[in-house]
Image: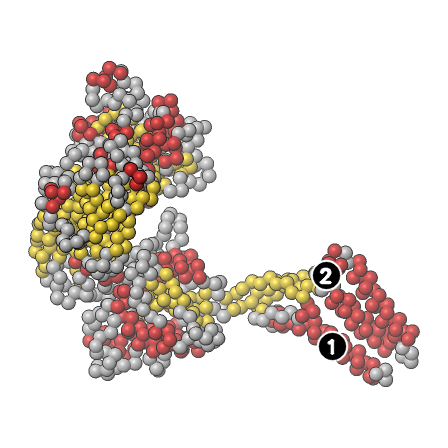
Amino acid sequence: MVSKVLGWLLGITDVETVDGVGLSFAAPWAAEDPTWLIVGCLAAIGFAVWYYTRIQSGLTSFPAAALATTRATILVLLVVTLADPTVRLTANRMLKPVLYLVFDGTESMNIRDNLTPDELASLASAVGSESPGSQVVSPALTRQQWVQAYLEKGDHNLLDQLQAKQDVQLEYFLFDGDSTSVARRIASGNSNAPLSPSSIADELTTHGKVTALGELVNDLGNQSTRRLGGMIVFSDFAHNSGIAPLGSSGPNEPTPLERLGVPIYTVGIGAVSTRDIQVEVQPPLKMKKAERSTIAVRLNQSGVQGESAQVTVTARPLQGESLEEASAMQDIVVGSQLVTFDSSIQYLEFPFIPQQSGRFLISASVDVLPGEVSEQNNESSRAVNIVDDYIRLTYIENEPTWEWRFVKEVFHRDRLVGMEGFRTFLRSADPKVRQANEMFLPTLTPQRSEFFANDVIFLGDVPSEALNDRFCRMLKQFVGQFGGGLVVISGPNNGPAQLIDTEIADMLPVKLDRSLALRSARPFHLQITPLGKQADIMQLGDSLSGEPSSAWENLGELPWYQPVLGVHSQANVLAQHPTDVCADGKTPQPIIATRRYGNGEVIYLGFNELWRMRRIYGEKYYRQFWSQIISRLALSHALGSQKRFVLAMDQMEYQVDDRALLTVEAYDENFDPIMADNLPTGGLQAQVFLGDTPGGQPLAVKLNETRPGRFEVRVPVYEAGRYTARVIDPINGTPSEIRFDVVGASAEQRNPARNLALQQAMANSTGGASYELSAASQLVDDLKLHPVAEEISRSFPIWGTPLWFIVVVALLMAEWIARKRANLA
């Protein structure tokens, strides 16, 4: 109570506690030297005493002393006022908490659910329309219309009841967006008046293309104040983009909900279980022409237990060896199976022997059953590379090592590399051997056309003097510009510190330091990181659980490793030392790490002892690890000389009315960039048409040069279907093609069921509560928000406060009354 009164006297409301009060003077003459202030105060006191003792006669000693004291105090306050006294107050005050009401504005809220009679009656009762023949119930409403009807109902309106709570301030948001979820504040026309429920309902739309709940929570956190006490979310919680609200962007990173730090009250709308079938095609990472592969298809179903549907898998070329061959192989039927749905998740396998190489689109489709809410998720596609050629791998080493020997044996027998694909530059090899044996390269710096035809380059324990500037420059261009793969393997003799003064060091996932010597005092067991347990290249054996198999345990103790200064900010560490740390004292020493660099990727190994994995199981797991390395690094881009002229789309699927981005990386025979000035009149042209062959008049567009060797153009697409983009290679005159899909429905239509598990998890993990729309009225009683404590530190002139006014007026009145009683006034 005392703190509240003191806060009021000093002009601050809602003060809970006062922690400190300080006084200073703002007038320069008083702030710099208080001597004049003291002199002024003494002069005022002396004048008052002199006046009432010398001038004002007829007073006894006590009245004279009292009047002199009062007058002296008034004059001193006047002098102090001229010095501009400033009070600095440190206090805590309790503010009314803010409650956010957030409404889903995405396309999934436009779905009309097939509700049971009981569910329909419950919702009708909740929105105040219990009559089965009322306009609200028939025809059935979309999810957003149910929310709007609930907001607009007359009796026991939720918003009216919440606004009636004097201890809560309400703010309203709608979230939508094309590529992520953005919270848009629903504003009132009159900022001084609260929004009416009907005006809020009128603002609710369904234009959002994705539901990104993690990004939504982050966006609301950026817009919120310290007064935010809680949040109510009306949604179907069909999260389908970006980080999940309960997910983390990295180890030891807080989730979006943890960063927000307030209770979430979730109100769900939409059917939890729907009649729906989802298909996902899962082709292997690599396929080879004329060799058998298996395509897996995953089926998820709800509400169709015991029913049957036909599943068909097809293959369509995106880029063939020639246009004629691609056109002759359209719509290859890989297989078809009739499946009876007896579980929520089922897997099918389709054998496939491709007869053509190139980039193919593998598609799986399942028949649409009557009553399905969404048909878009009945088809799934994935682009794969089918190779007939071979992957070109070059291993650069100073002298033969066990790793070099065994890697050479593995890739000589690998069906994607073979004897023709593996080449090595061995610095210690006899020059005669290099000339006589075609496996050995005579030089590190061959012609550019030969060098850039590589797909993966291994760089071993090579001294810096062996790596000339031309090689380093071409290697950097090979990875960053042409999307090649680089594997850097540390060795015990030279180590990666030899790369510090080269351009290669800029690409590595680790930071090097030449003062760090090889550590071999304490053997250790490799520790797989959480990221490593999820990485495809680290999955050995037949287990799909994501845990390291016994293959990594079979590696045994490693006798040494190469320490580094630190880890690059863009790196992913897949394996680390169990105890040793980097220079910061916290980051474990990386042993296996990866990093995207430009269009390619670099993999770093801090040792060259992986051959020890062979000691029990032979080359089974050893071969698997290195095969997964080259599949990841090589099959993610065009192979060999195909890298010279490459068409690419920024995505393989677009929405109607999108602008698809077509990009061409164009180089000449020597892999020097083609520039617009060197092209014929008209520049680089693309033809874009619906289907596989031009029908009528195809759309002709000119590609614009964005940098030497790179051309791009935005292509508008107004109709759903599969499109083909064709560009003529200006060097050899052959056409290159790429295909992409345009769909009429967004990701919001692919999974029509409400995500009840996420809805409940968001509420339970934050101390909130979860409700159905039909029971949301309980929120008013369950909502437990507390006033928010705010610490304030404020400086203000004391003469403008109620305290100063009361003191001055009280002193003047006291003197006037005293003089009146003494017959002086």
Q: Count residues near mark 1 (Cα–Cα under 10 Å), then give few for <14, some for 14-19, many for 20+.
A: few
Residue 27 - label: 2
Among numbered discs 2 and 1, the one appearing first in the sequence:
2
**What amino acid type should be assigned to the residue bearing mark 2?**
Ala
Is residue 518 among the parts visible in the rendering?
no
Quadrant of the image occupied by residue 20: bottom right
Of residues 350 and 483, the one drawn nearer to the viewer in this rendering: 483
Taking the spot 28% from the left edge, 51% from the top edge, the residue there is 714
Quadrant of the image occupied by residue 240: bottom left
Side (left or right) of 262 relative to 732: right
Q: Position of residue 616 (x, y in %)?
A: 22, 31
Distance from the alpha carbon under mark 2 to that under mark 1: 26 Å
**What amino acid type should be assigned to the residue bearing mark 1?**
Ala
Quadrant of the image occupied by residue 38: bottom right
Kindly give the residue lying farthest to the front in the view shown.
Answer: 681
Residue 720 vertical position relative to residue 801 in the rendered view, above or below: above
Taking the spot 69% from the left edge, 69% from the top edge, the residue there is 799
Q: Position of residue 281 (x, y in %)?
A: 17, 50
Taking the spot 22% from the left edge, 34% from the top edge, the residue there is 641
Residue 678 - label: none
Check if mark 2's residue and mark 1's residue have beta carbons within 8 Å.
no
Q: Image quadrant for the N terminus?
A: bottom right
Could you tell me how many numbered marks the image carries? 2
Side (left or right) of 788 relative to 759: right
- Label 1 sits on residue: 810
Residue 700 vertical position relative to residue 386 in the rendered view, above or below: below
Q: Image quadrant for the C terminus?
A: bottom right
Q: Position of residue 519 (x, y in %)?
A: 40, 28
Q: Count residues near mark 2 (Cα–Cα under 10 Å), then give few for <14, some for 14-19, many for 20+.
A: some
Q: Secondary structure at mark 1?
A: helix
